[in-house]
Image: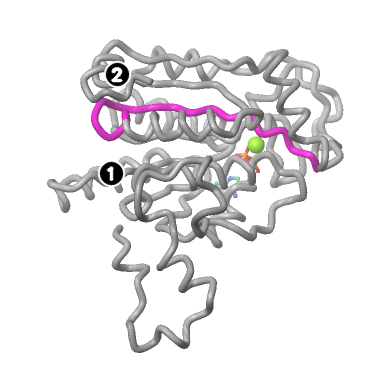
Amino acid sequence: MSKRITEMCPALNDAMPTEYRELVENGPWLGDKTVKDLGTFKELLEEHPLCAGCNLALSLKIILSSLPNPADTIIVGSTGCSSLGFMQVGIHNIHSLFGNQNAVATGVKRVLSMRFPDKKKDVVVMAGDGATADIGLDMTIHSWFRGEKITTIMFDNELYANTGGQESGMTPAGRVAYMAPLGKKFPKINLFEIAKTSGCHYAVLLTTANTVRLGACVKKAILLARDVGPTYVQIHTPCPTNLKIPPEESIKVAKDSEKERYAFNEYVSEAAKSFLENTGNKK
Ligand SMILES: Cc1ncc(C[n+]2csc(CCOP(=O)(O)OP(=O)(O)O)c2C)c(N)n1
Ligand SMILES: [Mg+2]
């Protein structure tokens, strides 16, 4: 909830691991970091146990490097591949029961608003497609209906990767997976359109193909959630392990998908537009 929790007792300074000292002294705390600053500061997530070539891991690193105020950000995660990375993330994060992430985030946001009325605390949900659009759909949509000021980020690898490859509502029609050998019988859910009609003030569809744009959109989504209302970021994160993509080709797969069926699409509500205009953030 604040960088003070990360800071160490000066007497223990010499005893702390170098990694930790670097995070405290040169983490993304100062200034408004962007993807372009990567390499100049200590990242909130460096090593992680996700598979080689994982687009979700790449997105996670980009997102964590684009938080407008990491020291006052709380991430609410859910079970799935992304949850394996959160143990190594250097800011507050909560692992909620699978599917409950937007309900938990609602509670966290409301309590923080009461406890720190004069501070801006960002609550960001990060979860897979199964958690967001299948088992947690009720929690996701109802947080949007209620106008909760939280950002929901979905890592859309288009299946339940962590449990071995079952189909989800976000799996495209016809897709065969390790545990869905007959192929998906109906089309992919259009959660982007649902977000637009369920009270989100900002919704964006994108891939890992353009990391600078991904970082900028995440930042915008979090800033709009602070002051205007719910926001939604849907990132296509093709899974090399389940989709049998050679790790070195996984970015190419994301790039191709952006050209074909996962084209960049951004929705900004009228209220969000005027907020951006008034705050000079239009660009
Ligand atoms: C309440 C509950 N139901 C089911 C599970 C089993 N489970 C763990 S991970 C997972 C799949 C997650 O899929 P997704 O949200 O798409 O994330 P991914 O692993 O693809 O990143 C499931 C069903 C669970 N842990 N808890
Ligand atoms: Mg998934």
Magenta span: 224-241
The answer to whether any part of residue 238 appears in the image is: yes
| Left or right: where 52 falls relative to 264 | right
CB at disc 1 and ligand 1 closer than 8 Å:
no
Q: Residue at x 37, y 35 (%)?
A: 222
Q: Residues within 10 Å of mark 2 (few under 14, many from 20)?
A: many
Mark 2 secondary-structure assignment: helix
Give the residue at mark 1: 109
* The N terminus, quarter of image: bottom left
Residue 72's spot in the image, x, y percent?
31, 52
The answer to whether any part of residue 100 appears in the image is: no
Q: Residue at x 69, y 52 (%)?
A: 50
Residue 118's spot in the image, x, y percent?
13, 47
| Left or right: where 108 falls relative to 241 | left
| Left or right: where 70 falls relative to 20 | left
Q: Is residue 191 magenta?
A: no
Q: Nearer the viewer, residue 164 or 154?
A: 154
* The C terminus, quarter of image: top left
Q: Amino acid at mark 1?
A: Lys
* Depicted 24 relative to depicted 119: above or below: below
Which label was assigned to residue 272? 2
